[in-house]
Image: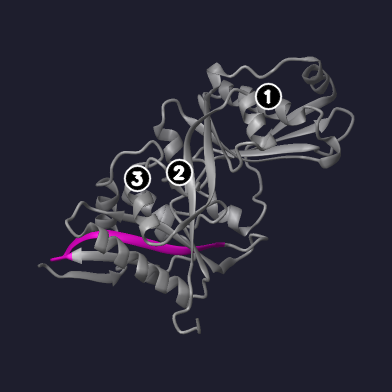
Amino acid sequence: MALIEYRTYRNSDPPALVDLWRSQPALRGRAPLDLPALEQLALAKLYFDPRGLILAEEAGRALGFVHAGFGPTADGTALDKSRGVIAALLLRPHERRAEIAAELLARAEEYLRREGAVEAVALGASPAHPFYLGLYGGAEAPGVLESDEFTLATLRAAGYDETGKRTIYQARLAELRPPVDRKQMQVRRNFVLDQDREPLPANWWEAISFVHGDCRRFTLRPRTGSEAVAEMTCWDIFPLGRLWNPQAMGLLSIRVEESMRRQGLATFLLGEAWRQLAGEGIGLVEAHCGEAGSPYAGLLAKLGMKPVENGVVLTRALQNPEAPA
């Protein structure tokens, strides 16, 4: 039986990592990887640590890799090393595939534990998306896609438990018909929609996460005032959004001032933003929602967006083996 060797990242590894990524089954939510995208979305990140990227090799040929990192603190100003992220786990078909996957995960978890993590989330769950955002999942990191059957089964077998689910909604802008009623007509008379094509990031983490994408911010303000009462932010899901036909934008956030809620502002804001984006040649929009029965899910459905897939949020406690039971 051939010896499987495990080691951390070397500067000569990018071609092997790209080849491993390209060897995976095609998924709606996984874009092909090339060297520039690997550099931009992983290796060039300021917090990239080669100790967190671990490869499995047989006779010098890469069989798989795992990449571990960390999400942000609550205020988005630094890394939160108490919560680790298994950002990627990819393997070639192999008779010992399950064994290799388990060993890669164990080594990644040990790295996270040494850095102070007490928990790991599998493949990220926004805003915990240190690497590969835009290459896997879609507009946000939704956990593990249900269509990614091998990864999902491998992580569950390794002791990762489901702690949430995120539904991915999409719609073609040509088919969307935002509601037109008395409330919406009143909003149109009383408010103005502005678009900022180069919005300032809210914090360090947002700047790091979307530096490679085309972000837009739409704000709604009263015609008689200058202060925005509602805003939404979206981005072009690079590179996935440029591979889908038609080109896509993904909704990142929407906010309405508490005193202005239940007046139809969110419906108007999204509908008008979609209309402007359609005029610029954008054909598809995507949004992620964590709760099927939430008002946000109801808003997306009201605008004609439909579920296309689910992401499963899987987490595992990282117990210190030296700690008393």
Q: Position of residue 11 (x, y in %)?
A: 30, 66
Q: Position of residue 74 (x, y in %)?
A: 66, 61
Callout 1 amino acid: Glu
Which residue is identified by label 1?
272
Q: Residue at coordinates 62% horizontally, 59% vertically from top-left?
A: 204
Q: CA distance from mark 3 to mark 2?
A: 14 Å
Q: What colour scheme has been applied to the protein in the rendered image? A: one colour
Viewer-side residue, 160 vs 246? 160
Q: Residue at coordinates 83% horizontally, 19% vertically from top-left?
A: 186
Q: Position of residue 47 (x, y in %)?
A: 49, 66
Which residue is identified by label 2?
137
Q: Residues within 10 Å of mark 2 (few under 14, many from 20)?
A: many
**Can you tell which of label 3 and label 2 is closer to the viewer?**
3
Q: Position of residue 32 (x, y in %)?
A: 33, 42
Callout 3 amino acid: Glu
Q: Residues within 10 Å of mark 3 (few under 14, many from 20)?
A: few
Q: Is residue 248 above or below residue 51?
A: above
The answer to whether one can see residue 12 in this image is no
State the mark number for residue 149.
3
Q: Are marks 2 and 1 in contact (CB under 8 Å)?
A: no
Q: CA distance from mark 2 to mark 1?
A: 26 Å
Determine if the magenta segment contains residue 62.
yes
Specify the farthest residue to the top.
181
Labels 3 and 2: the sequence-earlier one? 2
Determine if the magenta segment contains residue 270.
no
Q: Residue at coordinates 58% horizontally, 21% vertically from top-left?
A: 279
Local SS, label 3:
helix
Local SS, label 2:
loop
Labels 2 and 1: the sequence-earlier one? 2
